[in-house]
């Protein structure tokens, strides 16, 4: 088995959040120049991704309790939503580091998951109380009645790419599809064994849903009925599953402190596992799909995906586009080599033909006859073997 890849950058969390407070959420902001982290102590902090230097003071809202969920707006990347222990969602402005909105307390227990709709006008929240809510940003209120799920606790909420369907998972082995407009259940899918749970969800644009379960990764279909399929071998519980912005890479973080990378179109593993020392809890891709970060109980780890793709020991390349470019370059090099060999051969043939032409009285300008297999002509000195291959 290939050894795991250690991070390229490690940012110390000392002095960032309260001592011993776990980082529960992480993402990239400010055109991927900074990372934003949330903690169980209820604080939010922005740092420079390359040096770890703090950007301003931590953001807090008195009485919110720990922050368990965070998501960056798909339309306005300076806007962040968080879900807290007190059952409220809050909107924050990254540039000013100020809270812009606080919802009324709709959930009776902690919010464990939040997700923006693709158009950025709605936010879904899932709670420890087993309910899910859809919030309208413009109206600043809940859309219709709450969704009372079949999960004792809702661990994850996720919109479909078209924003018409919401899928939820929680403290059982089922995922449930909901109509966003009516908030009625569309269907239920058994994702894993009865003793297992579904902790996190990633819905790709090609109608595939990837689920992080108690013992590994499972793939289901968003619109088609059918059995689920397991990706790879059984692992420790999956605590985070995220999709790169270009939809070419899927990352699954496990409580065994390893991160596996997958091609979401082929369901095949990509490269070697990434490794962080202890306490893995959350993960995120940069918007440019060039960086990947993970954190938890101690420091923040960052990997350069381009550097990983150049790793000669990787089982397969990380970026299909880069692999394709290398493939073309290899064949171009091979073609040049063949052309050079052919050039030498044609050079010897030309020398022989000139000698024969002198004896046969064949003049210059008979190249067409030569190419069509008729008399052996003499060749102009400026013509090359590459021309003859055209």
Image (tube, rainbow, N blue to C red):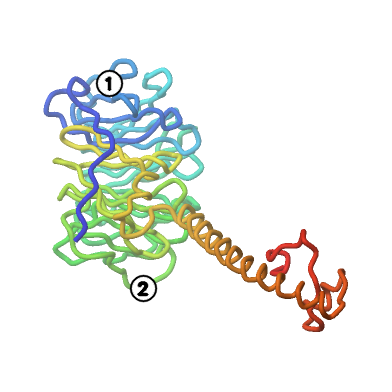
Q: Is residue 97 above or below residue 165?
A: above
Quadrant (top left, top right, bottom left, bottom right) of the C terminus:
bottom right
The image shows residue 215 at horizontal and vertical percentages of 18, 60
- Disc 1: which residue: 61
Residue at figure coordinates x 44%, y 39% from the top left: 287
Q: Position of 53 compared to 356: left or right? A: left
Q: Position of 9 compared to 244: left or right? A: left
Residue at figure coordinates x 22%, y 22% from the top left: 16
* Residue 288, visible in the rendered structure: yes
Report the Cα–Cα distance between label 1 and label 2. 45 Å
Q: Is residue 15 above or below residue 90?
A: above
Q: Would you call the spot at circle 1 few (<14 residues within 10 Å), some (14-19), or many (20 or more)?
A: few
Residue at figure coordinates x 38%, y 56% from the top left: 317
- Quadrant of residue 245 within the rendered picture: top left
- Disc 2: which residue: 226
375 or 88: nearer the viewer: 375
The image shows residue 300 at horizontal and vertical percentages of 24, 33
The image shows residue 321 at horizontal and vertical percentages of 49, 54
Question: Seen from this angle, which residue lies furthest bottom?
Answer: 374
193 or 345: nearer the viewer: 345
The image shows residue 234 at horizontal and vertical percentages of 18, 63
- Quadrant of residue 56 within the rendered picture: top left
Q: Would you call the spot at circle 2 few (<14 residues within 10 Å), some (14-19), or many (20 or more)?
A: few
* Residue 169, visible in the rendered structure: no
Q: Earlier in the sequence, mark 1 or mark 2?
A: 1
Q: Position of 379 compared to 146: left or right? A: right
SS type, badge 2: loop
SS type, badge 1: loop
């Amino acid at each position: 088995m290939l050894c795991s890849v250690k991070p390229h950058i490690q940012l110390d969390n000392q002095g960032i959040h309260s001592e011993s407070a776990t980082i529960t959420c992480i993402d990239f902001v400010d055109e991927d120049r900074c990372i934003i982290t949330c903690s169980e102590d209820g604080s939010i902090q922005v740092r420079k991704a390359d040096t770890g230097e703090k950007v301003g003071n931590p953001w807090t809202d008195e009485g919110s309790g720990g922050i368990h969920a965070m998501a960056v707006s798909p339309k306005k990347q300076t806007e962040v939503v968080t879900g807290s222990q007190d059952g409220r969602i809050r909107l924050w402005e990254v540039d000013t580091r100020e809270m812009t909105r606080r919802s009324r307390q709709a959930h009776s227990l902690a919010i464990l998951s939040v997700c923006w709709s693709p158009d950025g006008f709605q936010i879904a929240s899932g709670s420890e109380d087993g309910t899910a809510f859809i919030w309208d940003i413009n109206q600043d209120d809940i859309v219709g009645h709450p969704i009372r799920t079949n999960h004792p606790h809702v661990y994850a909420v996720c919109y479909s790419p078209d924003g018409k369907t919401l899928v939820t998972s929680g403290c059982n082995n089922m995922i449930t599809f909901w109509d966003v407009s009516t908030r009625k259940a569309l269907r239920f899918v058994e994702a894993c064994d009865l003793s297992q749970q579904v902790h996190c969800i990633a819905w790709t644009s090609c109608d595939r849903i990837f689920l992080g379960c108690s013992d590994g990764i499972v793939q289901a279909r968003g619109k088609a009925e059918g059995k689920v399929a397991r990706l790879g071998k059984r692992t420790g519980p999956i605590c985070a599953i995220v999709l790169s912005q270009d939809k070419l890479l899927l990352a699954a973080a496990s409580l065994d402190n390893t991160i596996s990378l997958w091609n979401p179109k082929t369901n095949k593993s990509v490269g070697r596992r990434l490794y962080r020392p202890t306490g893995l809890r959350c993960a995120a891709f940069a918007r440019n799909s060039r960086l990947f970060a993970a954190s938890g109980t101690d420091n923040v780890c960052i990997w350069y995906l381009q550097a990983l793709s150049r790793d000669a020991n990787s089982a397969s390349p990380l970026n299909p586009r880069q692999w394709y470019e290398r493939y073309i370059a290899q064949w171009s090099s091979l073609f040049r080599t063949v052309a050079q060999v052919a050039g030498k051969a044609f050079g010897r043939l030309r020398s022989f033909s000139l000698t024969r032409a002198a004896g046969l009285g064949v003049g210059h300008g008979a190249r067409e006859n030569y190419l069509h297999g008729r008399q052996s002509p003499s060749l102009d000195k400026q013509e090359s073997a590459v021309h003859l291959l055209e």
